Image (cartoon, rainbow, N blue to C red):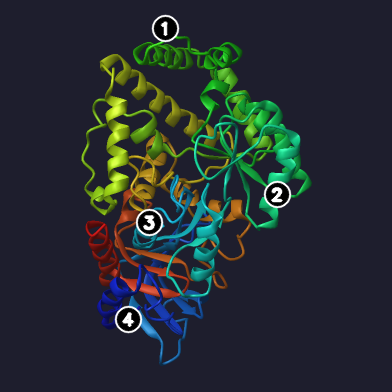
Amino acid sequence: MRPSLAVPCLLLLAAGGLLLSCAAPPENSLAITHVTVIDMTGAPPRVDQTVLLEKQRIAAMGPAGSIHWPRSAKIVDGSGKFLIPGLADMHVHLTAAGEPDGSRKFMIPLLVANGITTVRDMGGYLESLIPLRKEIADGKRLGPRIFYSGPYLDGSPPSFEPSFVVTNRTQANEDVHQLVQRRVDFIKVQSILSRDAYFAIAEAARREHMAFVGHVPDHVTAAEAAEAGQHSIEHLTNVLRGCSRDEPKLMREQFHVPTKEDTTARAHERVFRWQQELLDSFSSKKADELLDRFAAKNVWQTPTLVLLKHDAFPTLENRDEENENEKYVPKATLENWQKSRAEQRRFVGQAESDLRAGLLAKSLAVVAQMQKHGVDLLAGTDSPAPGVVPGFALHEELALLVEAGLTPMQALQSATSGAAEFLGNEKDYGTVAAGKYADLVLLDANPLENVRNTARIRAVVVQGQYLDRQALDGLLAEELAFVRSH
């Protein structure tokens, strides 16, 4: 987008709907000159490069002075800047839980403004996702490329909506086939599936040549999920349990049937004891065996550490931290977050806070071990889960991956080249190279020196359209106005 068009366009967005394509069309030719390119192949940064974009693709790239462009091309001086591929958030929910048109109204601008040009929607309403993807693909709406599963496959009653309840082989076959017919990109399994239903889904997915991903159900071990062919595991579900020397005992205790005498406080105490046992029974030997199996079976992991920190394992120290980016969250969503936080405060003392900190630390340590064992990782956030602000959360996730022990390059690859490999789109996305789609992020500082520099965004190129800092600030301002009016 040319700077002179950014402000008028964004004013029209307010009248015409979020991110509808009143935006300027993609530049016919755009040259980013004298820029340092971090192509995400693992190669050292290439300094003083010129990158030529034409018709939504990278037409050419090479040392400054070696690339020629049309006289009509828009020129962007990249001196002192760093160019990386567009980022992928590999776990989002664009329609949110329970709302067919849900949070996509506020999520899409936040994703684009944060350099996210690809998302993997991990459970949502196809009634909204199908037309949304088409609008973006047709250039009628500015947004990231979307890959989706549609409804969850879960037990009864399901944890979230939309869900298909699967309790037997017939339902598994019918539901998987129906979703394949609707052209989903993968099947998403949830936590309360029975063993029989889970393995029936795995069999149906194999028969339909469709990948299945998601949670490791509570009735299934992580090792069994790997053997069944689950292609990615989200949130490290039941991975720590799989690293325990007492996994069978933990599984039995996990399925306690409440009695009339059980109170909320007693239930809370039971969970506390179970989590303490989970942490205390961690076995390095069991962990090595499980992670080797993940690597051998090509089971990718999306740990969503930002979700674990803010929602699964919040401590007394971090549960009340202010997040200035929550100003972009709609009131209704924020109220739900606040209810969740209030529930988490009940009965929580220092002992439980310390336990949660220990579980988070152990989760980070396991992620570091995954990298060493050759287990492939994906950066994802579970936006908009409580405390996880869409767009901004991915930069925090990258920082947590580095905190866990990954190098900045490894963390960045989990949101770029690794994501493209997982999606089977290496020829089009994930690295900066001639012929790839022009999904790029221009940064003011080197993310290999400090991964948090991914948030220092100077411009975003999404499907060939150049959005400078003024345009990105305009998106955020427009979004803030939208949130305050709803």
Residue receiving disc 2 = 210
The disc, 4 or 2, on the residue closer to the chain's N-terminal end is 4
**What is the crowding at mark 4: few (fewer than 14 residues within 10 Å), some, or many (at least 20)?**
some
Name the quadrant containing residue 276.
top left
Residue receiving disc 3 = 107
Q: Are marks 1 and 3 in contact (CB under 8 Å)?
A: no
**Mark 4: which secondary structure?**
loop
Q: Amino acid at mark 2?
A: Met
Q: Name the residue nearer the viewer: 272 or 354.
A: 272
Q: Amino acid at mark 3?
A: Met
Residue drawn 63% across the image and 39% down it: 299
Question: Nearer the observer, disc 4 or disc 1?
Answer: 1
Q: Position of residue 387 (x, y in %)?
A: 32, 40
The disc, 2 or 3, on the residue closer to the chain's N-terminal end is 3
Q: Are marks 4 and 2 in contact (CB under 8 Å)?
A: no
Q: Are marks 4 and 3 in contact (CB under 8 Å)?
A: no
**Which residue occupies the extreme bottom position in the image?**
71
Q: Are marks 4 and 1 in contact (CB under 8 Å)?
A: no
Which quadrant, please, contains the C terminus? bottom left
Residue receiving disc 4 = 2
Q: Amino acid at mark 1?
A: Glu
**Mark 3: which secondary structure?**
helix
Q: Amino acid at mark 4?
A: Arg
Question: Nearer the observer, disc 4 or disc 2?
Answer: 2
Question: Nearer the observer, disc 2 or disc 1?
Answer: 1
Residue drawn 32% across the image and 46% down it: 333
What mark, if any, has residue 261 been given in the picture? 1
**Mark 1: which secondary structure?**
loop
